[in-house]
Each structure stands twice: as structure tokens, then as C-alpha cells.
Image (cartoon, helix red, strand yellow):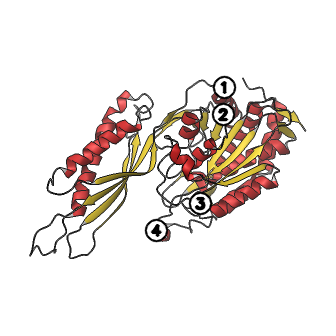
Amino acid sequence: MSGLSEAHARRICAEADRRFDAELEFIKDLVRFPSLREHERAAQDFMAEAFRARGLEVDRWKIDVEALKRHPGASPVASPYAEAYNVVGTYRAERNDGRSLILNGHIDVVPAGPVHRWCSPPFEPQVRGGRLYGRGAGDMKAGIGAMLFAYDAVRSAGLAPRGRIHLQSVVEEECTGNGAFACLLRGYTADAAIIPEPVGEELTRANMGLLWLKITVPGDPAHASGAYSAGVNAIERGWLIWQRLKALEARWNEERGEHPHYCDHAHPVRINLGRMQGGEWVSSVPAECVLEVRAGLYPEWSVERGKAEIEQAIAEACALDPALPPAAVEYHGFHNGGYILAPGGDAEAALGAAHKRVCGEPLKACASTASTDSRILGVFGSIPSLVYGPACTGAHGIDEYVDIESVRRVTKTIALFIADWCGVAET
Ligand SMILES: [Zn+2]
């Protein structure tokens, strides 16, 4: 049962409403930063300034690659980290007798794809029909705005949380999770965490594990005429590997009945061919082809189990051309198991009470076929991690948008959660 009084809840929601236009402007400002991998720094500086303006203690640091490499739970670092800065804003409670909280969001976004297919430029946010459009609008700059303005709503309602709060803006969520991992290695912990990823105002009960792999396939280059030898086409060989991985995906999906969180899902496992590159010259049989693949894993599985089955499928395809060397497999990003939020915790109860107050309905739980930073905080930090955020359409696609009223409700829900979870004192 929530310990938050009706009067306090009303005051907090009224403040969230009063500040909502400013919140929307803040989210639009965030969308204007094309915070793609290796270009997150300016957006992170903007976040640091936003934390500073609120009187929060600001910690901005470059991710320590060596520290990550020493931790077996971190993912491989395969891309430059020169611009990989994390930012944390910390509120320290005067009466530090309440529960502590982490509010975590990722600042990185994925590429926009063919810009000419967007109705409006991806990094020029536009409001149309109650929706905010732009790359990252939903995934997850609206979530970052919601958590920050949720904190604001509590403070401007004349209330001081009684527990410590860390507002974290991290990088690397879209490729490794190493940004959230770096927060953990820096010592940030709390009694609970909320990650406002765009999950349609439901609580994420389970997240998939995830692997990224790069498969380099050798061919036997030759003149395309076949005048000297027919050669072996590396792209075609790569395509055979991909067929095997699609068959593996089908087999894993057939096993979904054994996984209680995914048994009702039509297609929980996705193995995605995200990039394929190969060939050197139109009139040459390709010497090399590189496939980059993302594979979801059931959360009950170990990473090793997933890797073993994937590598076997690749080896079987390569064995069709025994005269050639097999493909080389490299793990160059996500390398992690999934996360299941144990039901019935205090944080879940508090979120459920806040959600019901704002939305009038019980909080529903869902199982996500994606992976989020909840596994980092939940598995390696032992912090109950609640993924709960607004409704979004087109994440990682064309014309991504977030539903604006959904952002308002989520902001209020998180604000009520903060007040209930940490406790509040009148200021
Ligand atoms: Zn996300």
C-alpha cells in the first residue's frame, strides 16, 4: 500500500502538468542532438548542464575501458570510446532515512536510415497529432525527459525526497550496455532502479539476452568469367550461413513453450542480419564477405549456450566448402544474458500504486524481446530494475515517434513513485 498522501500526490501531479510544456521542449532539445555512437558528447554536456541547473551533484566521466575489460560481465569493447562519457546527477537527502533510487536512461540513438523517407528530418523534432517525431524521441529521450521532470515535479511541489537519487544518462545502451556497466563499476547503487524505456506504460517482467557477432567469410576469388577457375563466391557462402542462422531462429522459437515469459509470444527470438558487406569488384568472384548479426537469447539461457548453437550452425554451413577455411566469428558488441524481474517486490508494488493513481488501471507486465540496461543493474548490481516508460512507435525505424500524453502520464507515475519510494519531507 502506498504511503504517499492524496494531497501530496495531487500537488506533484499538478506540478508535472504545470511544467509539461517545458518538459516537451527539453525532450525536443535532446532530439536535436544526433547522439549516435561516438557522437554522444554534446548531448551528455547538455545533460550535465541540466543536472547542474537543478543543484544536483554532477559526475561526468569518460568510460574506463580497462576497468570494463577486467569485468567478465561487460561486453567486448570493439569501437572507439574517445567520446564515450557518462553523466550522473546526484540528489543527496538531508534526512537520509528513505530508500535510494537510480533513474537511468540512455542518450545514444541508432542511425536514422534513409533520411529522405522520413516525413520530417530525424533530428529536427516535430509535434504532429499529439506525437513527437524524431530519431530517439521515443528510444529514449522522452524517457530521460520524463525521469528528470518527474524529479522536478516532486521538488517544485515543495517536497524533498528522503532518500538518495542518482539520475544517470548513459551511453552504449544500443550496442553493449557498457555505459550502465561503467556506472556500476564507479560505485553507483540503490535500493531500486527505474529505466523509462519506451515500453507502452507496462512493466517489463523479462528481457532477452543478446549477442552481436561479426562473421568474416572467406571465398576463393577468381575472374568472374570462369576462364581460369570458377572460384567460390564469399557472398553466396555468407548467404548459406545466414540460411542456417534463420533455421536456428525457427528452432529456438519452436521451443518458446518451455519459457514461461515467452510461451504466448508468436516470435520471441529474433536473429537479425543487420549488416552484410562483401565483394571487391563486379567482375571478380568475391574474396570476402562480412555479416553482422544480432541474436536474442531466452533469459534463462547462458551466453555460452547461445554461442555454442550459433557457432555450430555457422560451422555446418562452412563445411559445405571443405576446401576453404571456415568463417571467423568475432563477438563485437552485446554479450549478455537476459533479466527477469522477480515478481512481488516492494518497488514493483510502489510503481503499481503510482501507475494506478495516474492511469486508473492496474499495472500490466510484459515480456520484452529486446534487451535493456536492466540486466546490468539487475544482474550485476543486484538492484531491482523496473523498465517502465512511454508508448513509442517506429523505434530504430522510419518516422519514430512518442505519444505525448503517454509521456505526461509516465512523468507523473515516476514522480509519484519517487515520492512514495524515497519518502518526502515538506520543504
Ligand atoms: Zn532504448
Which badge, 2 or 4, is on the more N-terminal residue?
A: 4
Which residue is under mark 3?
Answer: 133
Q: Amino acid at mark 2?
A: Ala
Disc 2 to disc 4: CB gap under 8 Å: no
Residue linked to disc 2: 192
Pointer 1 with pointer 2, Cβ within 8 A: yes
Circle on res. 25:
none
Label 2: few (<14), some (14–19) or many (≥20) C-alpha neighbours in 10 Å: many
Residue hosting label 4? 114
Which mark's residue is nearer the viewer, 2 or 4? 2
* Residue found 47% across the figure and 44% down from its top: 370
> Residue 168 appears at what percent x and percent y?
67, 47
Q: Position of residue 108 (x, y in %)?
A: 57, 56
Residue 283 location in percent, x, y?
20, 76
> Quick check: marks 3 and 4 in contact, CB under 8 Å?
no
What residue sits right under mark 1 in the picture?
346
213 relative to 158 in the view: left or right:
left
**Disc 1 residue type (three-letter):** Asp
As drawn, 56 above or below 302: below
Q: How many marks?
A: 4
Residue drawn at 15 percent across, 51 percent down: 320
Q: Is residue 272 left or right of residue 341?
A: left
For marks 2 and 3, give the CA distance: 31 Å
For label 3, the crowd category at 10 Å Cα-Cα, with few meaning under 14, some 14 to 19 and many 20 or more, is: many
Badge 3 or badge 4: first in the primary sequence: 4
Helix, strand or loop at mark 4: loop
Q: Earlier in the sequence, mark 1 or mark 4?
A: 4
